[in-house]
Amino acid sequence: MSRISLIAPTALAIFGGLILGYFFFSLQSPQSRSELHRVEIIRGQSFSEIAAALDRERVVQSATTFKLFALVTGSAHQLKPGVYVLDAASSSPSVLAALVKGPVRDVRVVLTEGMTVKDIEETLRRHGILTHGSFSDLDIRQLARTYPFLSSVKTLEGFLFPDTYDFFPGSEVETIAHVLLNNFQTKIWPILETHPDFLEKVILASIVEKEVARLDDRRVVAGILFKRLALGIPLQIDAAFTYVKCKGLFVLCERPAVARTDLDIPSAYNMYLHTGVPPTPISNPGREAILAVLHPTTSAFLYYLSDPKTKRTLFSATFDEHNDKRGQYFK
């Protein structure tokens, strides 16, 4: 056998290996960090146009290698039209598989009571619903033309009603805001609109939502808060510290616990230093918390704390009694 005949297969093998290596690495995800992109495939759009759109949105590393892989696997003509939310950290085969499977029609997400605006934003992003923008970008004065309860507020905090929602992937933040605000307007505003101080009621309800779990306890705590306000006593709300420390996060905050050193934080949300209510709600309360504030229970109590084990609320009429319970339950 000639030397040339031996070299040819070897050269082909090396060349083929290089091509396969390039092909393999080209199919890897363009970036390691998760980043969601909204891509729409229009009915009648050519395969080359789809590949170019994926490349333009940085969902695939190379339109050429994506097309080659799709052709080799026989998937080039199986892509389905629709709106997709694709992760730039996914590999090209994963992106292709998603396009062959077809778009998700909607995504069900549960926004729980006590979530903040930022909690909601991050939750929607993790579900691929909100891919860009934030609620802070919205013009509240413009929204107030539709929702009268926003006419005297500076933030949407407290008015994005927690509930179970079905959203389309890649929704615009304006669309999501309208859905949440419409729900508040339907379920909550009718019981609040007769109260001139409704904003204070929402702020107190946001506190009650974070501080107390049981409905009967919530009404007692609401009564204590109103009593403290009337007496000019600081509300001493720990949850307000968490709101500041975690920069508007609660559910997704890594270190929500309040330390003694936090009591000196020079913030308008420091309810140990300042009397009155915080400048804004500190969460988005549910219906029960709002009803507790609208129908508070009058009692002899002036202090409360939560048992760290059972979450049961412990009430006290005097400061000494309150300190005794604190020493008993917080050893």
Image (tube, rainbow, N blue to C red):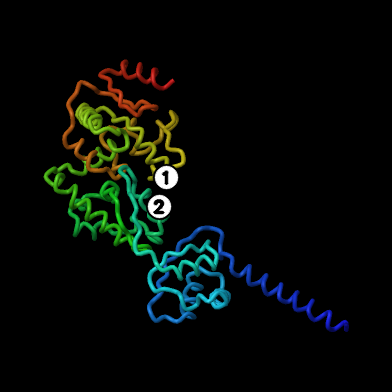
Residue 155 makes an appearance in the image: no
Residue 68 pos. (x, y %): 57, 77
Query: Real-space Cα distance between discs 2 and 1?
Result: 8 Å
Residue at 35% in and 36% down: 239
Identity of the residue furthest to the right in this view? 2
- Report the disc number at residue 287: none
Q: Which of the two discs, 2 and 1, labels the residue nearer the N terminus?
A: 2
Q: In this view of the protein, which residue sits in the foreground, 218 or 50?
A: 50
* Dot 1 amino acid type: Leu
Residue 18 pos. (x, y %): 71, 73
Q: In this view of the protein, which residue sits in the foreground, 302 or 49?
A: 49
Residue 326 pos. (x, y %): 37, 20
Q: Which residue is mark 1?
A: 252
Residue at 50% in and 70% down: 96
Q: In the rendered view, does 121 fall on the left or right side of 181?
A: right
Residue 138 makes an appearance in the image: yes
Q: Which residue is mark 2?
A: 122
Residue 50 pos. (x, y %): 46, 76
Picture quarter with the C terminus: top left
Classify mark 2: residues with Cα within 10 Å, few (<14), some (14-19) or many (20+): some
